[in-house]
Amino acid sequence: MSAQTVFTNGRIYTVSREQPWVTALAVRDGKILARGNAHDMDELIGAHTKVVDLGGKMVMPGIVDVHNHILLGGLSELFELRFPGTLTRTEILDLVSAAAAKAEEGQWIIGTQWGADLNGILNSDESLALLDAASGGNPVLLRDETFHNRWVNSAAMAVAGITQDAADPEQGTFGRDPKSGRLTGLMIEAASGIVERAALEQGAVSAEMNIAAVKKAINTLSAFGVTAFMDAASMQNVMQALAGLDDEGGLTAWAVCAMPAVEPTFLFGIAGDALFAEREQYRRDHVHPDFVKFFLDGVPGAKTAAFHESYLEDPIHGCCFRGETMMTYPDLIRWLGKCEKLGLAVKIHCAGDAAVSQALDAVDVVRSFNGPTDLIHHIAHASYIRPDDIERFAQLGVAADLSPMIWYPTTFLEAHREAMGEARAERFWPNKDLQNAKALMAGGSDWPVIPNPNPWNGIEGLVTRKNPAGAFADKALWPEQAVDLASAVEIFTINSARAIGLGDDVGSLDVGKSADLIVLNQNIFEVPVDTISDTKVEETYFEGSSVFTRSAP
């Protein structure tokens, strides 16, 4: 049997411990037919075999992104005002003013993403007045870098029906100036959804925009070498767009969907049982609606994450506030039990260590009644973990979803220091401890919370614990928690594939697996570790076919 394509003369890293490096691969019918050296390929090259000379370049399996938001990523790239989380209030206002000057009257200005360390500055009468002046009367909705909170202007609050006497929504807060008590436009957690829904109802996002956004997002993923991913909050519109794209032959990545148990604050539609009942109509060869998403708490910078120890004292929360979970413990156990009976694994958002403990406790209880299962539940973010809970990940078969890619100094961390204090904030992402405990660690982007799904920033950060962009250059975040490069690559390939239920099909270049591979501009094992983030994907292959080729500069 001859191969359809043979790749030869390469430095091919298989992520297979029995044969980590080869120089040649053969592909047939979208799967890896053989691997080895050029001589091993001789009998597989027929009259119609395409032979690809890699020219000595490094090849590895495609990246498996365990956590992103495909629709939001595409919408952000195509239709929104984008800016880095390092901008000052003045710089953000200048961008809003420029956008307002080009906008039609009444058009929504939607943008991302202001730094979480600006929470205190934006929560003031002065900041709202400045935003109102910059907006030219247009409604403005700006998301923070966690995507949990928003900063909006008076016009947006008026459209959403938020008045000065409005009571805080359940599991959310309307920001108010600590001195005057007046609304500032800061929307915390569930309050954000009120304005997001108002924008949607006014037509800020159309069905046509959603389809275009998913197509754009898939192209973006291919350019970064991502050939499989989990969308971490898949509503009907997300699964419908993915299924439609697969029907057209345009879905060039494996998509696993996590359906929200409860409607999130940033996406809208049916959730829970009603959504689960529809999941099979969206299943395709490359679309797998096999997970459920729970949001158990919020984010540390806004003091909405749940911790065992209290946050620093402030005028709003007092001296002993520790945050709280968004689901009761009995409800969490009931949901977990239901999902296991349906054959659905669960991804649980846990940003604080108390939320992590509660999630592990719930898994422990459900497993004690239901017995063993092949389902791999995820604790998403897994960023602050009580030391006693580290070993429980492996014991309970729970994956640590290491996402987003901020295991190095960022503005996220600056906001955590303000909320929790220096010492506690620095105990962020205990990755080496998880590895030593033999936990399944999977890598993700949380795009567009992270502005792009670039895995090379994440891989370098795992190894150096320093910011690859050069920000905070004099700092390393808890450097003892660094992992070696081979482990970092496994985290973003085979580990993530196993975590999302695709380990038998993708994640390594083993015979019989999907021929998903990427050609790199440098051998990441032969360059200084602080240049790994400079890596570029020159070509991406999905099921043996080229789906992205980088143009010459």
Image: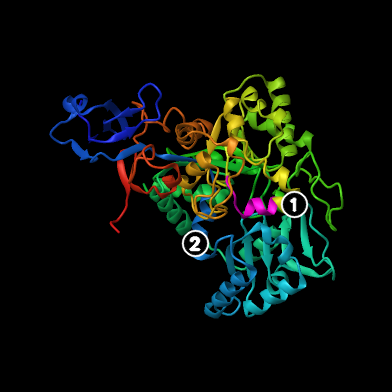
Residue 436 image label: none
For the residue carrying disc 1, how many other residues have a C-alpha within 10 Å: few (<14), some (14-19), or many (20+)?
many
The residue lying toward the viewer, choosing from 184 and 425, is 425
- The residue that disc 2 covers is 209
Three-letter code for the amino acid on which mark 2 is drawn:
Met
Residue at image x 32%, y 53%? Answer: 550
Does the image show residue 91?
Answer: yes
- For numbered disc 1, what is the local secondary structure? helix
Residue at image x 62%, y 55%? Answer: 411
In the figure, residue 20 lies in which quadrant?
top left
Residue at image x 84%, y 57%? Answer: 316
Q: In the picture shown, does residue 449 fall above or below 97?
A: above
Q: Earlier in the sequence, mark 1 or mark 2?
A: 2
Three-letter code for the amino acid on which mark 1 is drawn:
Ala
Q: Which residues are magenta?
A: 408-416
Q: How many marks?
A: 2
